Amino acid sequence: MKHRAAVRVFLAISLALVLAVPAVNLSEGLARATALRLITQKKTDRLVQLLFNSDFLMAQLSALTWRTGLSTNPANVVVGQEGWLYLGDGHNNNTSAQRFGESENDARLARDMGQNLLAWNRWLRAQGIKGFAVVVGADKHRIYSDHLPDWANLQRTARIHGLLDGPARLLIADPTPALRRLSADGAPHTYYQSDTHWNMWGAAISLETLRQTLTQQGLKLNWALSTPPTIDHTGTRIGGDLARFLRIQATLTEQEPHPALLNRDAIKSDVRELGTGKTLKAGDFGQLQYPGRIVQVVTEGAANDLKVLWVRDSFGIAQSPLMAANFRETIQVHWGPALGEQARLFGNLVREQKPDLVVMTVVERVLPSDLFLTPPPQE
């Protein structure tokens, strides 16, 4: 009898929660107006979706479980210690690949990629390029490993070890050592706790590594960032992409350290779609999301009167206002379309735009990839 009573109570509570969901969803005026419109249009399926949308419940559940170290979306998010969030195995098998470290296949890919980058460097130099560098979008797992859950802590050699120590090492700007030195408790964070990416302070450290790499290649550059970089002031923003996966983005606040710029006004740039000339709007602080199109950014008063072809991904978001401050013109394109289809788009942009420099900003987890084995044109 007690068992039956418990089942009845559970069913009653479950039914009450299910019936409460539409009431909560209809508590907002916009939702009520939408529901009336859907009823008039007899769109029953969409009405049911609206009434029984349980995102708010999932958000509340995520907020509770996140605080206890559990993820409601483990494929996308691993919950670490002290509220830190990390990318899960749903993205390039990220956590597991980091735990197991460099494999024989990774080492072979790294050697082949190193030779291929040298071939690209020779081809680019033949096109008149003055410098070529690949900036590693260092994986947050390796920078803030102390905040990972115990089961995910990293002790193995990095998957890209062979690339960093290989024949193309003078072309690789790896900010990992510098970022690690700045990851001590109490120091300003270089990465967001609730996001995959480095913040503007981390981006400044990565660009200092780029400056050093280009200097070693014989380039004399003016630099808009102080050397070493310093923080001008610290702002705030809401939670990042990993918090969004858990539906707790709006409930979190992140610090945003702004690096000191010697020409801060230079980040007010003219941003256009290349080819059409259509004006595009940058986000806060002049940041550009990873481009779904080819973007041209022109900044009068930049530190260097140089044109850069910048092949990048989302790790370039925080770098974008700093790149604008340093280089008068950047042509920005995502590495996916640029290097796909035998890198035809990349080669065409080099020939047509005739940049002074070529820079790639590539997230670490995709570097062990056949995509970066495409050889340069045979000409």
Image (cartoon, rainbow, N blue to C red):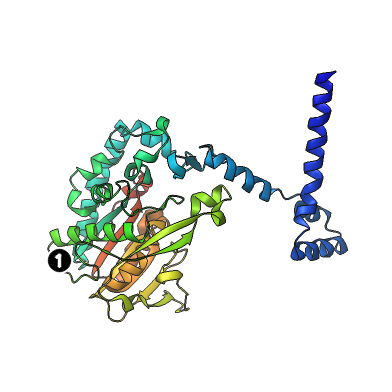
Number of disc labels: 1
Q: Which quadrant does the N terminus fall into?
A: top right
Image quadrant assignment for residue 165: top left
Horizontal placement of 197 versus 112: left or right?
right
Q: Residue at x 17, y 45 (%)?
A: 167
Q: Amino acid at mark 1?
A: Leu
Query: Dot 1, how many residues are within 10 Å of its Cα: few (below 14), some (14-19), or many (20+)?
Result: few
Above or below, comparing residue 174 to residue 42 in the picture: above
Name the residue nearer the viewer: 245 or 255: 255
Q: Which quadrant does the C terminus fall into?
A: bottom left
User: Residue 284 in the image: x percent, y percent?
Assistant: 45, 70
Tag 1 residue: 219
Q: Secondary structure at mark 1?
A: loop
Horizontal placement of 143 versus 8: left or right?
left
Horizontal placement of 234 versus 326: left or right?
right
User: Residue 126 in the image: x percent, y percent?
Assistant: 19, 64
User: Residue 263 in the image: x percent, y percent?
Assistant: 27, 76
One can see residue 377 in this view: no
One can see residue 140 in this view: yes
Above or below, comparing residue 6 to residue 41 in the picture: above
Horizontal placement of 71 versus 21: left or right?
left
